Image (cartoon, rainbow, N blue to C red):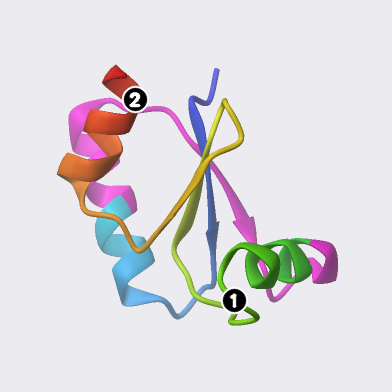
Amino acid sequence: MASLTIYSTQWCGYCHRLMKQLDREGVAYSVVDIEDDPTAADYVMSVNGGNQTVPTVVFHDGTALTNPSLAEVKERLAA
């Protein structure tokens, strides 16, 4: 079961780096491509001051981080 959702795009290098790090750490996640899903793009803009900034990571409690480091993600998951 995914413990978080990553809003991403195909071309986002920061997104791919974070996902590779999460894979290496064994952290489950699901990915939503905001270019394929207008509703997802609207959500990302709503939590990023109107910007489509990715990666936007949403946790099971509904909180979100924008372009977080692996350490920030792991810290939030441990809380």
**Is 17 colored magenta in this rendering?**
no
State left or right for residue 29 relative to residue 15. Answer: right
User: At which x and y percent is residue 72?
Assistant: 23, 43
Mark 2 and 1 residues: CB-CB less than 8 Å, in contact?
Answer: no
Q: Quadrant of residue 34?
A: bottom right
Neighbor class of circle 2 (other Cα within 10 Å; few <14, some 14-19, many 20+) is: some
Quadrant location of the N terminus in the rendered image: top right
User: At which x and y percent is residue 61?
Assistant: 57, 26
Neighbor class of circle 1 (other Cα within 10 Å; few <14, some 14-19, many 20+) is: few
Disc 2 residue type? Leu
Of 27 and 63, nearer the camera is 63
Examine the rendered structure and indicate whether residue 32 appears above or below residue 11: above
The stretch in magenta equals 19-39
Which residue does the image show at 24% across and 31% down from the upper left? Answer: 74
Pointer 2 residue: 77
**Is 24 colored magenta in this rendering?**
yes
Examine the rendered structure and indicate whether residue 64 appears above or below residue 79: below
Point out the tag, 2 or 1, that comes first from the N-terminus: 1
Pointer 1 residue: 49
